[in-house]
Image (spheres, grey):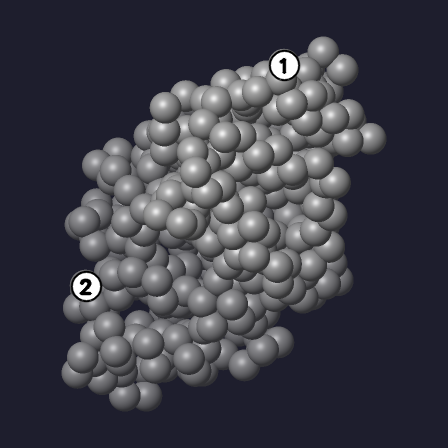
Amino acid sequence: MVTNDIRYIGVNDHQLDLFEGQYIVPEGMAYNSYVILDEKIAVMDTIEVHFTDEWLGKLAKELNGRRPDYLIVQHMEPDHSASIKAFLEAYPDTTVVATAKAFTMMGNFYRGLDLGEKKIVAANGATLELGSHTLTFLHAPMVHWPEVMMTYDSKDKVLFSADAFGKFGALDAEPEIEDDDPYGWACEARRYYFGIVGKYGMQVQAVLKKTAALDIGIICPLHGPVLKEDLPYYFNLYDTWSAYRAETKGVVIAYTSVYGNTKKAVEYLADKLREKGCDVVEATDLARDDIAEAVEDAFRHDRLVLATTTYNNDIFPFMNHFIEDLVERGFKDRSVGLIENGSWAPNAAKNMKAKMEGLKGISWLDTTVTILSSLSDENYAQLDQMAEELMK
């Protein structure tokens, strides 16, 4: 139960191995849906197709013999819209409410679907009266699809936020509590944000300006927990993330290493930084660790070192993937250092810099470390110098 009138009817998915075919979700995934019980009844989004029957059963229990008046479709991605057809077969008299672009997508997903007059195109700022509850629709294009809208219920002060403020993990999984993440939310919400929404910071900023004018007491996202306490904490994180500001002071060293020599340089640099008092040093092996976690860390901290080998006259594939992810998401306003390795023609540093040349606000360290196969005395001196630069 969200409030007396708003009931949660979502499901937990522990069968999924990769969300959107790429993000590992060891703690599963939650697909959220809600029903507002008033003089008229509104169902907020549907559910992933493998859980349609479970979801319809939960809905029927909450309806207790009544029938819904409206299905509000905020987002057409199939993890939220795949049960629309089954819902309409069960409740054919329901009126569907969505943006114009959502109805276009609905026709593409459900060929031959004819809603007739049973649809309302929700204009930005339009309202829908359920009785004591008044719903206001807020268009949120590219957060993170073009048809997205959010819905605000002024009676219970609830923002139905679509995919915004979502996170990885099923709701019956125990969150990992850390000192800087008191609610066990930020880590997987951050990885979710920069993986799924991160490219669209400008659009998120626009939505945050809209929501700032609302009296919000509860956030109901389409993934992750319902948020009821300390809402400024969540809004502040979303503002930081979408403005591409560093969240903490720390150094991320993202690397690939074929025979261990580049890794040896990374370990030496990390130890030097810790010796000098750097509180946060994250070294991540891009070939073995979750690249989505590495992307999350790169946006979280204010300094980044890229270390890789020259490979086929370019850079190692996992580093290339990582840099492409940063570029796609608009990585900016960070200090970046480069370490390259090559046995006969090292040029990875030049190639890494070229791949990132379009990014804004990148401050390149003066020191670039070039390793010829294995670490030399000169390399150790260069790594000491790089550590000094990073600490400034």
Marks 2 and 1: which is nearer the front? 1
Nearer to the camera, 30 or 250: 250
Viewer can see residue 184: no
Vertical arrangement, residue 276 with respect to residue 337, above or below:
above
What residue would you read off at disc 1?
A: 271
Residue at 69% over, 21% down: 381
Q: Quadrant of residue 78?
A: bottom left
- Report x, y in % for residue 129: 54, 72
Dot 2 alpha-carbon crowd within 10 angstroms: few under 14, some 14 to 19, many 20 or more? some
Q: CA distance from mark 2 to mark 1?
A: 57 Å
Dot 1 alpha-carbon crowd within 10 angstroms: few under 14, some 14 to 19, many 20 or more? some
Nearer to the camera, 176 or 194: 194
Nearer to the camera, 180 or 88: 180
- Report x, y in % for residue 340: 53, 37
Which badge, 2 or 1, comes first in the chain's sequence?
2
Viewer can see residue 78: yes
- Report x, y in % for residue 53: 17, 50
Residue type, mark 1 in image = Asp
Q: Quadrant of residue 202?
A: bottom right
Vertical arrangement, residue 375 with respect to residue 361, above or below:
above
Query: Dot 1: what SS?
Result: helix
Residue at 36% over, 33% down: 287
Vertical arrangement, residue 377 with respect to residue 346, above or below:
above
